[in-house]
Each structure stands twice: as structure tokens, then as C-alpha cells.
Image (cartoon, rainbow, N blue to C red):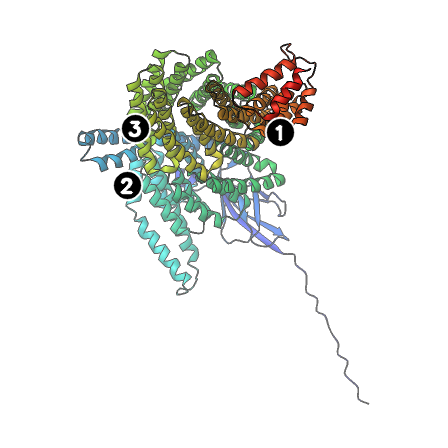
Amino acid sequence: MKISPILLSIALSAPLFAQQSVIKGVVSIHNSEYETGKRQYVQNATVEDDFEKATQQTTDDNGTFKLVFVGVPEKTSAQLIVKKEGLQVVNIDGLSAITGLRDLVRLSMAKPDKIAEYRRQIYKVGKTEAEKNLAAQLKKKGDQIETLQKDAVKNKSAIEKLQQEYAELQAFASKIEEQAQDLARRYAPVNLDDAAPLYRESFKLFQQGELSKALQILRGADLVGQANKILAEEKRINEGRQALNQQDSIKEQRKQDLLQVLGLKADLHKATFEWDSVWFCLELKVQLDSTNVYTIWDLAYFLGAQNKKYEAIHYYKKALILAQTPELKATLQNNLGNLYRDNQKMAQAEGAYNEALKIRRHLVEINPDDFLLDLAIILNNLGIFYRDNQKMPQAEGAYNEALKIRRQMAEKNPAAFLPDLAMILNNLGILYSDNQKMPQAEGAFNEALKIYRQMAEKNPAAFLPDLAMTLNNLGVFYRNHQKMPQAEVAFNEALKIRRQMAEKNPDAFLPDLAMTLNNLGVFYREIQKMPQSDGTNNESLKIYRHLAEKNPDAFLPYVATTLNNLGNYYSDNQEMPQAEGAYNESLKIRRQMAEKNPEAFLQDVAVTLNNLGVFYRENQKMSQAKEAYNESLKIYKQLAEKNPDAFLPYVATNLNNLGVFYKTLKQYDKALDYYGESFIYREDAIEKGGTHFFKDCLKVLRNIAEVKDSAEVKKDYASVVKAGRFLAEGCDSLKGINEKLLPIAVSEYGSLSWWALFAKEYALSEKAARHCLDLDETQAYVLANLGHSQILRGQYKAGMGTYEKLKGKKNGNNKDYKTVILEDLQALEEAGVSHPDVAKAREAIEKW
């Protein structure tokens, strides 16, 4: 018997170890070596993570710590918490750490007052130097332009180039405050103890306000050569021709040092307004750090601020591909939406905004404290987008949701969020005013005004411009709604503030002063204070012409607008040559601008053409009026093909004006065609929620009523019926918005049932009579018209049956319907409207 061996299986037990990872770091006193020559470390500071997955540590004599995470894999994100009495962490971005990395987490701490001192110092240098450099640059370029303009034809291209540079400089005046705050935010946390020597040397000069010396050092450092060397080394590594080795961390540090220096150089160029150099530095950073979404974002943001819209869109798209977190994707989509909107790419803008909105709503559900502010920002931008595109219900919804969020935030932190609350209220005021919601508009404007007054008392430099803006908007609101005393008070207070600001800083605030002067000019014209209107309009024009000499791209549009308003003023005052001259100069400027940028300025060309059409019509220059109207209409229809929500309202206005033109020529049928088309556009817009077009619809209906009256005098029955049908059906469709239109609709259907008989449209007469009775069964008089239509169509039995309902009754004038019917039949026969059954009907009725 063969015995099989017994195989023993022995399980060797290995001890189980929980997965561990570590974060190592060092904490030092911020800028201690830079300021004293010796680095000082923070001892006995407690270090822990906010998820409490690591054992709390304290720093040793050298400021080092080691957090051990149990059950946490390597490369896991962790948020550190470092505490030491009397000190605060300066570089708070460093508290976001990754487990398992070899490099030390380097944190720096300082006393709170020291951190504030760093920020104040950098802010002061940034603002002072920028203001000084801006003033010098503007003077230099302004002097160059004036010199070259002595021979403007010869120097045309040079002048245009300088004017463009002047425009870029001038546009930056209002951004100096923001840039200085941004510099303080970014540079105060930089621990110069860990910076490269070149960076330290140049930054020290920057702190001392020696920007030109700082730039001189950086220019002499051959940063491009260093960058090319690093890029070549990385190319060799990527191609596999050079193996990775222990020197990689040193190379990476060289790269990070160079990126830091390039960032400082870019900011120094910003402060000296050397935009091309800023662009160069930021592009070089992108080449060195092409997978860093924040580096690409910095370049995209700068290009957007410089009105390099298409270049900015290109880099935002690149950043979006690299973005990993939903919050970053939402921010980039929001910024893309703004750029698309500015470039009239409305479909792309709406898509980007809604994508950002979708992401931010989701983030708020998870963490409302961190993301509510971002949600309010995108909602405000969507509100602006929808308002610009005449989508008023959507705009109101977005603004009100943003307002609710801002109120919540302002209650918790008024100092931080009251300005944003006031901004939303101001936007809502404009929207409500456009939509004829007067109490809501006035309430929103006044609440915004109250907030800005409070803030301007504490910080006039920061908030007086906002106060003046709201006063200006309130003045426009009061003027548009015939509250003229209140409008004058608001405009004049805004004017006073803006004069004061313009005296101190003309480059930043002269445009605002000109705007309020322009609005006052329109206001004074409307209340027939013609000398004041003339004075404010011409002062506004003088300022805009002065600004446009050095910055035509920015201010020629305002010159054209003011000339257009002056044309209105001169026309009202019967100064016809001056009016025509102003309109034509405005048109010439707007045509030139539209050739360069049709998406931005074609609309303005159409506005002036339309005004010229009105001017020529009123002055009996009918051929010129027709030409101007038709070109204006052609442009608006072209624009409406791409963006119907924004431009169909203007198409409707132009059509209405063409109706007025043909009414003046007594061509009633053509006039009604244009009025009818105009009304249909308005009606469609109202059905989509645009109730703010209600007043425009009423205006068109009033014009149609005038045609009807004129056609009645001429006994142009076809036009009377056409007009009557528009009036009846128009009032009928709008009665849900304003119930006062119901009795008008009833009356117009009754009138239509009568005049349609004279036009021999008997079926229409019957239909109108029956609809009149459907709306109001008490309107017995239309039974006579109904009976007439039946008799005239050969429906004798039905007609007599209808007449019988009036037998023995009297109309509203106490006149017996027997007499009324007989007089009607006589009037119809005299107008050539009859039927063989009419004699038989008359004979029967005479026997009543």
C-alpha cells in the first residue's frame, strides 16, 4: 500500500500595519533673516490638521514639525492649523499641504500688527508710484500728440498709435486703487528669507519706491536666457535623452525662483504702465509653467483688462481645460461669459454663464458659507446679460436671487458686503424703471443711495463715485417718469460731486462729469429750460472732444451721442441748420466707428439715422427722411438676425416711425402696414414676458387710431377697416395687462362691424359684431350691424331675425332702433353699398 505524503500547509502570519503618511515642515519668523541678518524660528507652536487625522505636534528649537497621518494614503490634501500666542501665519496658502511629499512645508508667522504694516507699506508704494507714473506718462504722450498734430496729415499713423497708448493709460486711472490692494494682498505674505537673491534685491528697491532701479536690476539678469535654458533641459528630459537624477529638485527650484522673479517684473511694469513688457513676462511664465492653470489665468485676466478680448478668450479656454476643481471651472466660465458678452457673442455668453451658475449652485448645496458669494456674482452677471438682451423676467429673477444673498451676507458683515448690496439695488432700480415698476424702482434706488451715503461719509475717496453714479441714475429715473423737481435735485447733486472729483483727478473723473452734464442737457430740454440745456450740452461736448483728442477710441462714441442730443435740442428750438449739422457729424463719427467694429457700433449708426429720419420728415424733406429710415431699418433687421431679443424692439420702433412717415404722406395703407408689423413685434415680446413693451404697444395703437380718423375723413374705407381691425384685436390681446383696454376693445369691435360694411367686407363685419357681444353682451347696438351684414350677404331671413331683437327698443341716445336701422341702410346705399334684399328689409321695418 502506497502511502501518500501528507502535505502540511503552514500559514505564516505577517504583522498588520495601518497605512501612514507624513507632512514635514518648518515655521520661521516672517522676513527675519531679510530684516535682521539671522533667521529666527518659531518654537513650541502647535501644529495639527483640521480633520484631526494626525497627532498634534509642537515645533522644535529649529521650528520643524512632523505630522504622522494614520490610515491616510500619500498625496492626500490636508489643511494645517498652526497656533502660537501673539503670532499669526502670514502665508496662509502654505497651510494647504499634501501628505507624503519630500519637500518641507515652509510657513512664516508674524505679529498681527506687523502683517498689517507689510500690507500698508506695499499698498502705499503701489498706489503712490502708479499715480505718479500715470501722471508723467499721460503728460508725456499728451505733449507728443499735440506736437505731432501740428502736421496731422503727415503724422496720422504716429498720432493714432499714441492716442491708443494714451487710451490704455487713461483707462487704468480708475484701477490704480484695485491694483495697489492686489499688490498688498499678494506680496505681504512673501517670505523674503526663502526668496532668491535677485528677487530680494529688486523687491527691496520696490519697497523703497525705487521702481526704475528695481527694473534695471531685473533687465540686466538675462531672464529670457535663464528661461530658455530651463525649457531646453525640460525638453531633453521629456524626450528621454537625459535621465532623471537627484539634481531635479535643484532645477525645479531654479524654475520656481525664475517664475517668482518674472511675476515681480510683470508687476513693476504694470506700475510703470509698460503693457507690452507685462504681456511678455506673463507669456514667458506660461511657457515655463504651461500646465499651471493659475499662471495661464493670470495672463488671460491681464489681456481681458487690456481689452485684448480674443487673446483673453484663447487663454481662458486653455485654463479651463486644465482646471481640476469645480469652483475654478465656475470662475473661469464666469469670466469667459463676460468676455463673450462684451464681444456681442450672446449665445456663447449665455452658455458660459449658465455653466458657471450650475456649478456654483451645486457648490452652495455642499458648502454655502464658502460659495454663496460666488453664486451672487454670477447671478448679478446673468442679470446684466438678460437685461441687455431684453429678457426682463429672467433678469429680474437673477437680480432678486442675488439681492437675497447679498442681504444675508451684509447682515453678517456689513463692512464687507454693503457695497455689493448697494450695487445690486442700483441694477434692480434700472431694471424696474425699464419695466415701468415705479415704486420698486424708486425704492431700490433710494436704498442704494442710503447705503452709499453712509459709506461715503466714512470713506469718501472710495464711495463718492458710487454715490454720484446712483444719484445720476435716480435723476434719469425721475426724468423718465416726469418727476422733474426730484430729477433736477438728483442730477445737480451728482454734478456737484463729479465736479469736485474731476478737479482732483481729471483723468479718472472727467468722463463721469461729462455724462451727468449730458443727462442734464436732455433734462433741461424736456422742461423747456433751453439756455441751461444749451449750456450743459455744450460743456459736455467740449469735455468729450478734449478727451477724444487723446483717446478717440474711448470717447468718440460719447462725442457722437452728445452731438445726437444737441441735434434734438436744436431741432426743438427750430435751429434747423445747427440740428442737421449736429446729426450729420454724429452720423459720420458713428459710421467710422462701425467700419472698425460693426458689432459694437452699427446700432449707434441706426439710432442717428432714425433721428435724422424724424428730423427730415418734420422739415418736409421726405426723400431724405425715407432714405434715412430705410437704412436704419435695414441695420436693425441685420442685427436682429443674430440677436433678436436685443434688437427686434429697435426694429419695431423704426417700423413705427416709418408708419408716421407714410401717414404724413397720407399713404394710409402703407402706414398701417408698418404700424401693424411694429405692433406684432411688440406683442410677441410681451408674450415672452417683456411687459415693459406695453407702453410702446399703446403708442403704436394711438398712431393707428390717428390713421383711422384721417382715413374716415377721406372716406378711405379700406384703410379705416384695416386700422379698426388692428385697434380692436390689439386692445383685445392686451386687455389682460390693463383691464382698462377691455371697453376700448369692445368699442373698436363695434366700430369695425360698422365700417367693414362700407368696405363690403360683410363676413368681417359679422365676425366683429359677434366678438363685440362676446366681450360685452349689453352692446345691443351692434345687432343692427350684424343684421346689415346678413342682409347684404343675401341672408334675408337671418338678417330680419337679428333686426327683430331690436324691435321696440331704443339706443343709448334714446333713438328708436327702427329709425337707426333705416338711417343706416340709407347711409350704406348712398355709399354704394346695397343688395336687392335691402328694399324688402326697409319695407318690412317701416311697418314696425
Residue that badge 3 annotates: 548
Label 1 – label 2 distance at C-alpha: 102 Å
Instruction: Quadrant for residue 38, please give it.
Output: top left
**For numbered disc 1, what is the local secondary structure?**
loop
From the top left corner, tell me how far across and down residue 271 is, in percent: 34, 35
For the residues carrying marks 3 and 1, which lies nearer the camera in this image? Answer: 1
Give the side of residue 819 with respect to residue 344, left or right: right
- Crowding near pointer 1: few (<14 within 10 Å), some, many (20+)? some
Give the side of residue 446 with respect to residue 816, left or right: left
Residue that badge 1 annotates: 794
State the residue in front, 215 or 375: 375
Is residue 81 visible to the viewer in this orientation of the structure?
no
**For numbered disc 3, what is the local secondary structure?**
helix
* Picture layout, residue 287 above or below residue 467: below
Looking at the image, tell me whether mark 2 or mark 3 is earlier in sequence order: 2
Is residue 479 visible to the viewer in this orientation of the structure?
yes
**For numbered disc 2, what is the local secondary structure?**
helix
The residue depicted at 23 percent of the width and 34 percent of the height is 159
Label 3 – label 1 distance at C-alpha: 74 Å
Looking at the image, tell me whether mark 3 or mark 1 is earlier in sequence order: 3
Q: Which mark is residue 216?
A: 2
| Amino acid at pointer 2 | Gln
Label 2 – label 3 distance at C-alpha: 35 Å
Identify the residue at the far top of this view. Answer: 814
From the top left corner, tell me how far across and down residue 516 is, in percent: 39, 20
| Amino acid at pointer 1 | Gly
